[in-house]
Image: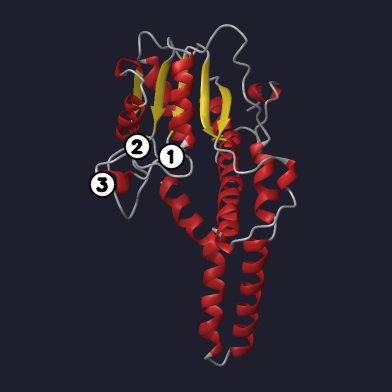
């Protein structure tokens, strides 16, 4: 129920959608007896479109998320016993139709997963991702990820595939069960969590809440760092996309905290919060 409710609420709260609805509703009102309100809505929507699309607001929102967790120290022994790659890097709808590997802008999750798999040849490689589609259904991301990883040189017998999770919390819960069922891969070993940097706070919080201790390996950075705090966008579409991405994570953090899926609003590397709940 949470999954479907989250999808419905986010459709309305997504900044780009909200702005479009605001302008569209205002345009309709202009042709009615509420023309004054219609003009106000259209004007407000146009202003929000310019601010969200061209200003550095999207970067300002995503930077705290990306900078929250530094990468784990891989020179510290012991080496990782396993690597966890979260879904969200593929377009399975297109990939299934075209019978070809199809990654999106988060494709670094799979790429860096393969790189680390070669660096640590003894480590297991776990992938978690099902089919999160509602209107358009496809096969699981795990199926596509397995094909991509093996083509990148990761042996099939190293892969642990979890194909039912539809969101981050389910990634943590289902994957923990999957690993506990593996005789050679206990969740109490050292595991790296590979996901987009902006998504790492919510992911770390969800895994901690599920009782699965992991170490962060953020990838798919969208900014250079503080240098982009004041960097405007030269395309409205890019600014809106950045705003949507960042807002989705902030709203996701709030929703997860309110529903007990994470135990603090903004998870951090601080060890103290892991014992809170």
> Residue at coordinates 48% horizontally, 40% vertically from top-left?
106
The residue under label 2 is 141
Answer left or right for 69 relative to 3.
right
Image-quadrant location for residue 40: bottom right
Q: CA separation, marks 1 and 3?
A: 17 Å
- Confirm or deny contact between disc 1 and disc 3 (CB under 8 A): no
Above or below residue 237? Residue 62 is: above
Q: Earlier in the sequence, mark 1 or mark 2?
A: 1
Judge depth for marks 1 and 2 and give the one in front: 1
The residue under label 1 is 89
Q: Is residue 133 visible?
A: yes
Judge depth for marks 1 and 3 and give the one in front: 3
Above or below residue 191? Residue 45 is: below
Above or below residue 26? Residue 225 is: above
Quarter holding the C terminus is top right
Q: Earlier in the sequence, mark 3 or mark 2?
A: 3
> Residue at coordinates 67% horizontally, 26% vertically from top-left?
269
From the top left corner, tell me how far across and down residue 158 is, in percent. Answer: 35, 16
Q: Secondary structure at mark 1?
A: loop
Answer left or right for 138 relative to 34.
left
- Confirm or deny contact between disc 1 and disc 2 (CB under 8 A): yes
> Residue at coordinates 30% horizontally, 53% vertically from top-left?
136
Q: Secondary structure at mark 3?
A: helix
Q: Is residue 211 visible?
A: no
Q: Secondary structure at mark 2?
A: helix
Q: CA separation, marks 1 and 2?
A: 8 Å
The residue under label 3 is 98
From the top left corner, tell me how far across and down residue 89 is, in percent. Answer: 43, 39
């Amino acid at each position: 129920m949470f999954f479907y409710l989250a999808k419905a609420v986010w459709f309305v709260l997504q900044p780009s959608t909200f702005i479009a609805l605001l302008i569209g509703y205002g345009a309709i009102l202009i042709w009615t007896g509420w023309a004054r309100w219609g003009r106000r809505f259209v004007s407000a929507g146009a202003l929000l479109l310019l601010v969200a699309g061209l200003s550095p607001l999207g970067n300002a929102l995503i930077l705290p998320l990306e900078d929250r967790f530094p990468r784990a120290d891989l020179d510290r022994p012991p080496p990782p016993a396993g690597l966890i790659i979260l879904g969200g890097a593929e377009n399975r709808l297109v990939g299934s139709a075209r019978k070809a590997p199809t990654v999106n802008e988060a494709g670094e999750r799979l790429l860096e997963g393969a790189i680390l798999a070669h660096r640590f040849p003894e480590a297991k490689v776990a992938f978690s991702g099902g089919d999160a589609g509602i209107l358009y259904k496809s096969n699981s991301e795990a199926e596509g990820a397995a094909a991509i990883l093996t083509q990148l040189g990761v042996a099939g017998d190293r892969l642990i595939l979890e194909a039912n999770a539809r969101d981050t919390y389910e990634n943590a819960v289902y994957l923990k069960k999957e690993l506990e069922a593996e005789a050679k891969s206990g969740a109490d070993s050292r595991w790296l969590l590979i996901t987009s940097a902006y998504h790492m706070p919510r992911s770390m919080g969800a895994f901690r809440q599920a009782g699965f201790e992991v170490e962060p390996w953020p990838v798919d950075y969208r900014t250079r760092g503080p240098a982009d705090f004041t960097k405007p966008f030269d395309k409205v579409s890019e600014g809106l996309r950045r705003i949507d991405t960042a807002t989705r994570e902030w709203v996701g953090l709030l929703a997860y905290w309110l529903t007990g899926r994470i135990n603090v609003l903004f998870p951090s590397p601080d060890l103290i919060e892991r014992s809170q709940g």
